[in-house]
Image: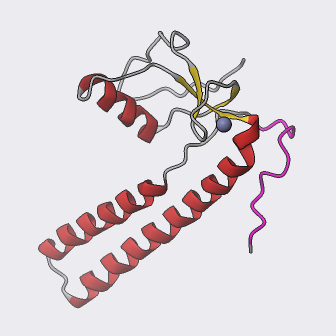
């Protein structure tokens, strides 16, 4: 499987032990094969926390199984649209507060609020799938108006 390799500037080592765990669907939590999810910053942070802080890394391969795909794609589009909304709100807040009170402290508060909104958006976190677009998966386009 040809996967796009992104060179990370952090120089973090990728865990080579993938596959020693189970293949688990992120939606139903069952041991089923499916489409792998992409390891993004959020997933990597969660794994890092599990490995280094809570010490309960299960080393599972996270996938979305066939049966859960419709549910997943709904959640994913909800997540992405919410994230846009939250970040837009955060930016708006930052702009307004800086207009009202242009001070370094305001900038700091605005940055914190932005971060807070970003954090809020992560409550609905839904990871991307690790697939190259082949036109095989159709109906991914969210058609809710
Ligand atoms: Zn499932």
Give the quadrant of residue 101.
bottom left
Left/right placement of residue 68 relative to residue 110 reads right
Give above or below for 97 relative to 137.
Answer: below
* Residue drawn 74% across the image and 75% down it: 145
Would residue 28 be counted in the magenta stretch?
A: no
Considering the image in quadrants, where does the N terminus appear? top right
Q: On the rendered structure, is 100 left or right of 58?
A: left
Q: In the drawing, does residue 47 fall left or right of residue 3?
A: left
In-front residue for pair 98/123 = 123
Q: Start and end of the magenta stretch? A: 133-144
Report the residue at 30% width, 31% height from top.
Answer: 49
In the depicted view, which residue is nearer to us: 31 or 123?
31
Which of the two residues, 132 or 32, is positioned nearer the viewer here? Answer: 32
Residue 19 against residue 105 in the figure, above or below? above
Q: How many marks?
A: 0
Residue 105's image quarter? bottom left
Main SS, magenta residues? loop
The residue positioned 42% from the left and 75% from the top of the image is: 89
> Is 142 covered by the magenta stretch?
yes
User: In the depicted view, which residue is nearer to us: 99 or 55?
Assistant: 55
């Amino acid at each position: 499987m040809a996967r796009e390799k992104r060179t990370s500037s952090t120089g973090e080592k990728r865990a080579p032990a993938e596959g020693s765990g189970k293949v688990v669907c992120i939606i139903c939590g069952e041991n089923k094969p499916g489409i792998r999810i992409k390891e993004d910053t959020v997933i990597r942070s969660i794994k890092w926390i599990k490995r280094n802080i809570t010490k309960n890394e299960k080393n599972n391969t996270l996938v979305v199984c066939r049966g859960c795909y419709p549910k997943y794609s709904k959640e994913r589009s909800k997540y992405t649209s919410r994230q846009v909304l939250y970040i837009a709100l955060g930016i708006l807040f930052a702009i307004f507060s800086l207009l009202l009170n242009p001070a370094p402290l305001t900038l700091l508060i605005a940055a914190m609020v932005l971060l807070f909104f970003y954090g809020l958006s992560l409550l609905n976190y839904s990871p991307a799938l690790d697939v190259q677009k082949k036109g095989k998966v159709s109906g991914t386009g969210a058609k809710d108006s």
